[in-house]
Amino acid sequence: MKPKVFQKSTIVDVPVSSVFNWHERPGALNRMAPPWDPLIVISSDESILPGAQSLLKMKLGPFSYKWLAEHQNYIINQQFQDQQVKGPLAYWCHTHLFDEVNDSQSRLTDKIEYRLPGFGMGDFIMGNNIKEKLNRIFRYRHRVLKRDLMLHQQFSDQKPLKILISGGGGIIGSALIPFLTTGGHQVIRLVRNQAQANKKQIFWDPIKGEIDKANIGDIDVVIHLAGENIGEGRWTPLKKKRILDSRINSTKLLLDFMKELPSKPRVFLSASAIGYYGNRQDQFLTEEDHSGNDFISEVCHLWETEAMKAENISIRTCLLRIGVVLTPLGGALARLHGMFKIGLGAKLGQGDQYLSWIGMDDVLSSIYHLIYHEDINGPVNLVSPNPVTNKEFTNILAGILGTKANKSIPEWLIQKTFGQLGDEIVLSSTKVIPQILSSHQYHFIHDNLKDYLTEQLGLA
């Protein structure tokens, strides 16, 4: 049976070599995975040269399967292919084609030839679904590729950076690393499993105050994202101690490490959160506002105070007051998406509390912006310029999914279920504005919640 053919092309305003190089670098596969249909890289040769293989774990509805692909037909700056060796389809061959339009423009074409299983029944049962799925996936992939290439192109005249990251396995870290490596930068992760240590992963233990300094060398940037998850489990006294200690101890360890470096990093980016401001109802909040007086505000205040000590050793320091990061891969949106999809969405309490949200791509690109803009230091709000109320968020998400969410979960039930976490996170109102980013010419990729959620859920 003759294979089906899917094809999509995009013009990119960068030279063809830049587009091809992006695909050759580690992390390209992860960066291209759509958030509503994620994949897990079980193993990869991290190469597109002939014979290199990648083993992936993917999902089809509630079921997961493994896909083994092998690269073939590599011609530098022109093409490469990945072919299914083992997987769910009868045949799959994905050809990546690269053409030079002119010195500063290139055309990327994804051409996919495939046959569905089942001796023709697969086409009858799944044919239109496969076509629509490919359309959604490659619309997303091409948007991300264009955005990333244009962002990296802004700083292409500067040397690649060596970047040390803590918390690389979290929601932000796992997205940030492939974004940076596809841009040509070297990333070293701090990991707590000594058995995982290698040239790209360095062992550390913030509790014991240990870090393997011998294998790191000079570092250009340190990004500190590690900390006990505040959104899991009730805030018992032991949990609250872990939340605080994990942030303070890890920051102290990184400061001691940076003090001993013969050449200091150009910048230290330390995570914090908009929980710094506490529950402030509908008051507009900027980086100039004081901290709140609840537990999470105290945690952020103490964490930031410790991190700012890096400036005492002449390291520019930015405190990332990160808002609610909306992604189907984890956090609030991942928990709510399934419930809303089956019509169980509801506003939380009265729904008048403000949600200062931010899209994942804006988290990544604003971090990149801070690395290169040497005139920025101190606290920086990483939030969309358009916060919404919980009621507005509820209506937008339900509308996108075509369901109703006209009920509410009473405040008393939230407080009883989550305790202090419910009061300070779920019901807290924080209306934050990204004053520093806006005043330093940062252009948001996503400032409209409806458009952003539509893209993230694969409906754009």
Image (tube, rainbow, N blue to C red):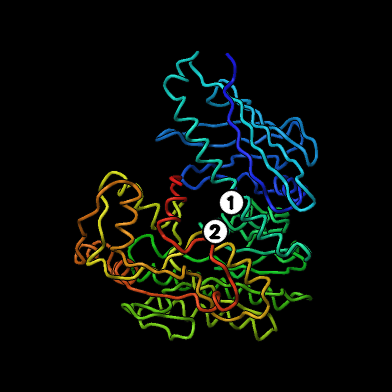
Q: Secondary structure at mark 2?
A: helix
Q: Quadrant of the N terminus?
A: top right
Give residue 354's quadrant in the image: bottom left
Q: Position of residue 268 (x, y in %)?
A: 64, 74
Q: Nearer the viewer, residue 211 or 315?
A: 315
Q: Nearer the viewer, residue 407 or 112?
A: 112
Question: In the picture shown, does residue 422 fall above or below 379?
Answer: above
Horizontal and vertical percent position of residue 386: 42, 69
Residue topped by disc 1: 144
> In the rendering, at what x and y percent does residue 177 appear?
62, 56
Q: Residues within 10 Å of mark 1 (few under 14, many from 20)?
A: some
Mark 1–mark 2 Cα distance, whole angstroms, equals: 9 Å
Q: Disc 1 vs disc 2: Cβ atoms closer than 8 Å?
A: yes
Vertical placement of residue 117 versus 112, above or below: above
Q: Secondary structure at mark 1?
A: helix
Q: Earlier in the sequence, mark 1 or mark 2?
A: 1
Amino acid type, residue under disc 2 in the picture: Asp
Residue 50 vs residue 146, the one in the foreground: 146
Question: In the displayed structure, would residue 230 be above or below residue 327?
Answer: below
Which quarter of the figure has residue 4?
Answer: top right
Residue, x 63% and y 40% (percent of image)? 9
Q: Residue at x 73, y 38 (%)?
A: 48
Can you identify the residue that label 2 sits on? 361
